[in-house]
Structure formats: C-alpha cells, structure tokens
Amino acid sequence: MSFQGFVQILRENITQGVSPNSFPQLLKDRLVPRNQATAKQLVRSSILEDANGVRHIFAFPAHCLLDVKLYPDYKTITPDAKLALLKRKKLQSVPAIPDVLDYDLIVDSRCLDNDTVFTESGDPRWLFEFTADEFKELINTFDQAKFDQFSIPLVSIRPNMTAVDQDEMEIKAAIETITSRRIRTRLAESLEIPPLPLSAHKIMLLRADENADGDDLASIVESDPSLASQVISWANSPYYGLPGQIRSIQDAVIRVLGFDLTMNLSLGLSLGKNIKMPSDGVFGYRNYWREAVVKAMLMERLVKQIPSAHRPFSGLSYLSGLVHNFGYLVIAEVFPPYFSLYCRYQEANPHVPAMYIERFLFGITREQIASFLFQAWGLPDEVCSAVRHLHNASYEGAHHEYTNLLYIVNQLVQSDGSVHLGRLPETLLSRLHLSLEAIEGTIEGINKFNDELNQLAEMLEKASK
C-alpha cells in the first residue's frame, strides 16, 4: 500500500478515537514500544505559528534543539492551545507524519542520519517505526511536507561542569558572546555585584553570631514590613497546622517555624528584593514559586530520612531548595532583550533541559550565575555548592551532601509540578545513606499537602508583584 493509503488509514482511526492497540494490522505492524528508540532515532514535534496565524509542525531528532532564531516571526502555540488541538484530534502526542493534523510539516534533515526513524503514534506509549528511506519517501510523497535544516545537536552545546572558581571567567567570557552593547554593559554592571538587600545582609551577620537568639531574628524581620508579612503568612499556613493563630514574628519563630527555619526562610525570601520577577516567561509567578516551595519542603523532609551521623543541616538544605532557581530571575534581569527569545526556545524545545538553552544563548547557565552571586554575597558555601552542581549526579566535592540531595529533589519534581519517583543512581543514594523507600514515603507525605503548598506559592506570588 502507498504511503498516502497508510496516512489515510491512520487519520481515519485517530479521528474515530481508536487506540493503537486496536489499529488495523497495517498500522500495528509499524508500532513498537517507546523504549526501543534512542534519542537520535526519535523524532520530536513542535507546533509553531507564523505571523499570519498559520500553524506548522516542526519535526527534529530528540537529541537536538530547534533553533527558533531561524524563524524569527514564528512562535510556539500555547500549552492550552496544544491541549485543545490534541483533544479535538483524539491524540496525546503529535505524530511527525504529513496530513494528520492538517498543518504543513517541516522535517529537519538530521532525522535521516540513522538507519531507523521512530515517530509519535498519537499514544505516548507507542511509536511508529520506519527505515530512513521509508521516512524520506513518506515526507516526499506529500506536498504539505518538506525537509529543511534547523536543529542543533545538544552535544555541541553541552554545559560543562567546570569548577566554581572558573565561573567568573566564564561569565566574563559570556559577555563577549552577546553582541548587544546594552546587554554587555548590563552584565558588566552585574559583575560588580549588586548590593545584598539590607534585611538579607542583617540576617547574614546574625548567622555568624553564636549568641544570636529568636528575639534578634524577630527584630530584623519586623524591620522589613514586607518580609514580616510573608513570614507570618507562612507560619499561618494550614501546612503547619495553626492557621490564623500566629499574630507576631515571635510567635512564628517560637511556636511554628523555629529559629533555624525562620532565618533561612527569611534569607531566601529577601534575596530577590532587588530583582523583579519576570511577568512573561514560560514559568510565570506561580510556577516559579510553586517549584521553589515544593523543593524546599522536600529538602527539609528528606534530610530527616538520613541517619543523624550523615545528615546535612536542615536549614541550609531548605534554603538550597528555596533559592535553587534564583539564576532564572537573574537571567530575566540581566538579559531583558534576550529573555523573550530564551522563552521562545524553551517553548519550542520542552524536551531540552534549560541549561542547554542557556549555554547556547548566553554561554553560561543560571546555576553558574546564581552561585557566583551567592558567593559574592557571602551565602554559606553549602548553598553555593548545591546550586552550582545541582545537575551533576556524580558530584563528590565539598558539601556534596547538599548538592546530591538537591539533585534528587530536582529529579522528583516534574515540569508540571507533580512529584513522583523516577530513576535515581544507586551510587548517589548510597553516598547520601538514603533509601528509595524513604524517598517514596517522603513523596507520599508531601503530596498530601498539595493544596497547602499551592497556597504558600500564591502568597509568595502576590508578594513578588
């Protein structure tokens, strides 16, 4: 049967809501389980819209980045629009097959680099298998499909794992990769280190005082009305079981949060007072704070599952989770003309970790920037190390307990905000003296407070505007 016939049968079955398991034998013969495809063989699809509102499907290998700079007038359709489209077409994923979605299909020529090509079937559990020659013939058979070159292999832009003491050199080198004079100047100013907010500076001094107590901390927090309001709201959250009963900072410190947690929470909340939360962006206010809150809480809970002889400090672990994504705010502040482009890349390449896109556009990652600023501000080395190396599962350097724990938490929290257990290296768990059973129990416990964590995130969202 011709490829036109193959596509016609596929369209008829999809539009009738037939699952791949019920496909006619002609389609079934090409179905294989998803785990049989490598990243180089798998074809991913993104739907972009041109300036006239005409939609196009861009198909490219999963080990590549879609270079949206080549299509400056195109933008990725919103997640809601994509969800509505898939629902209307009775699909769960976008097949890189011509004529299925009534949009022109543009296929990157790198898809033909391997002998075998796998495309989405509409069901994320199954893929269609073609030889490279068959896939080429399939694309060439339809007028609505064509080949082009627009992808970049991730291996060519892989962020390196250099030592922290090289970060300043890389940040300065990154300035030279940005051609805009305005951006070069802006980043150069940032390298002179913006001042630490006054409340954060006072908390840092208090941290170094062995005789400091709750009254000293309460005095600092109370001197900053915005911070005081956030801390009291935090303590009044249903998450801590005393909603509406906390009236003062002293109550928050003594009855609910404790000295250590209050200090690290206050420090984390005050760090960004001189940096504006981006109003556009892929994540927005709520998703940024939701992720920060969930990861901070997970860090705090997982620490308690580690034997006391190997346990890192709970407060510093909590702070590492709360500020782990601080570099995202800095990127929005330092690279404003490029931030929109950065968001476009993230939208068009949801399968690509943000650090690859950052390396491609800026020459540095958000983790390098944040760690550099944290060091300059005098934040604890444990936090600097955790943020800098959070993507490195093999890190065994100084303060690796915090880094390794943050790596695990980063793997647990998914892009949609859900928390569930995936694959974790056995060597990493052994290094932390942490069991999978303990992690599963922690996930189960944190998921019971989903509504309460959303409330905390909403509170921080409002305070950031």
Image (tube, rainbow, N blue to C red):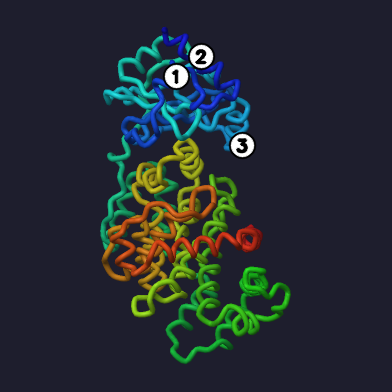
Q: Earlier in the sequence, mark 2 or mark 1?
A: 2
Q: Residue 205 location, x and y as percent?
A: 46, 82
On residue 249, the disc is: none
The kind of residue tagged 3 is Asp
Quarter the C terminus occupies: bottom right
- For label 3, the residue is 80
Numbered disc 2: secondary structure: helix
Q: Are marks 2 and 1 in contact (CB under 8 Å)?
A: yes
The kind of residue tagged 1 is Leu
Q: Earlier in the sequence, mark 3 or mark 1?
A: 1
The kind of residue tagged 2 is Ile
Numbered disc 3: secondary structure: helix
Q: Residue 96 location, x and y as percent?
A: 45, 24
- For label 1, the residue is 27
Q: Residue 379 location, x and y as percent?
A: 41, 72
Regarding residue 162, the answer to whether it shows in the image is: yes
Regarding residue 73, the answer to whether it shows in the image is: no
The image shows residue 372, relative to residue 176, as above or below, that is: below
Q: Are marks 3 and 2 in contact (CB under 8 Å)?
A: no
Q: Residue 191 location, x and y as percent?
A: 38, 60
Q: Earlier in the sequence, mark 3 or mark 2?
A: 2
Corner quadrant of residue 137: top left
- For label 2, the residue is 9
Which residue is drawn at the image coordinates 31% and 59% (left, top)? 426
Nearest to viewer (mark 3 / mark 1) = 1
- Left or right: 60 as drawn, with respect to 398: right
Mark 1 surroundings: few (<14), some (14-19) or many (≥20) residues within 10 A: some
Front residue of 437/163: it is 437
Determine the CA span between mark 3 and mark 2.
28 Å
Which residue is drawn at the image coordinates 60% and 54% (left, top)? 286
